[in-house]
Image: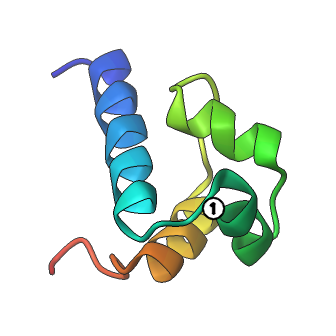
């Protein structure tokens, strides 16, 4: 899997997990302290989240550890 495919897979995962938790983009963005635009770009694979962003997202959507 190349880097672009990894970004696309991560984007889909974040989107699907957010939807599973029934959070709107605004709700999750507010919870992680980022803008709706940023989170939308992450979910579309247009923006690369930092480790801190990924940690915040994972804590809010229930995937706090990659080892779960």
From the image, which quarter does the C terminus lie in? bottom left
- Answer left or right for 31 relative to 52: right
Which residue is located at x 29 percent, y 33 percent? 9
Q: Which residue is mark 1?
A: 53
Q: From what the image shows, is residue 52 above or below residue 14?
A: below
Which residue is located at x 65 percent, y 66 percent? 28
From the image, which quarter does the N terminus lie in? top left
Which residue is located at x 66 percent, y 53 percent? 25
Q: Residues within 10 Å of mark 1 (few under 14, many from 20)?
A: some
Q: From what the image shows, is residue 23 above or below residue 25?
A: below
Q: From what the image shows, is residue 37 above or below residue 55?
A: above
- Coordinates of residue 12 in the picture (x, y in percent): 35, 37
- Answer left or right for 9 relative to 56: left
- Answer left or right for 1 relative to 9: left
- In front here: 23 or 40? 23
Examine the image and state in which quarter residue 21 appears: bottom left
């Amino acid at each position: 899997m190349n880097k672009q495919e990894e970004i696309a897979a991560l984007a889909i995962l974040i989107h699907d997990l957010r939807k599973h938790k029934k959070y709107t983009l605004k709700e999750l963005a507010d919870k992680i302290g980022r803008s709706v635009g940023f989170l939308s770009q992450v979910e579309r694979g247009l923006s690369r989240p930092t480790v801190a962003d990924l940690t915040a997202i994972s804590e809010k959507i229930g995937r706090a550890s990659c080892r779960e």
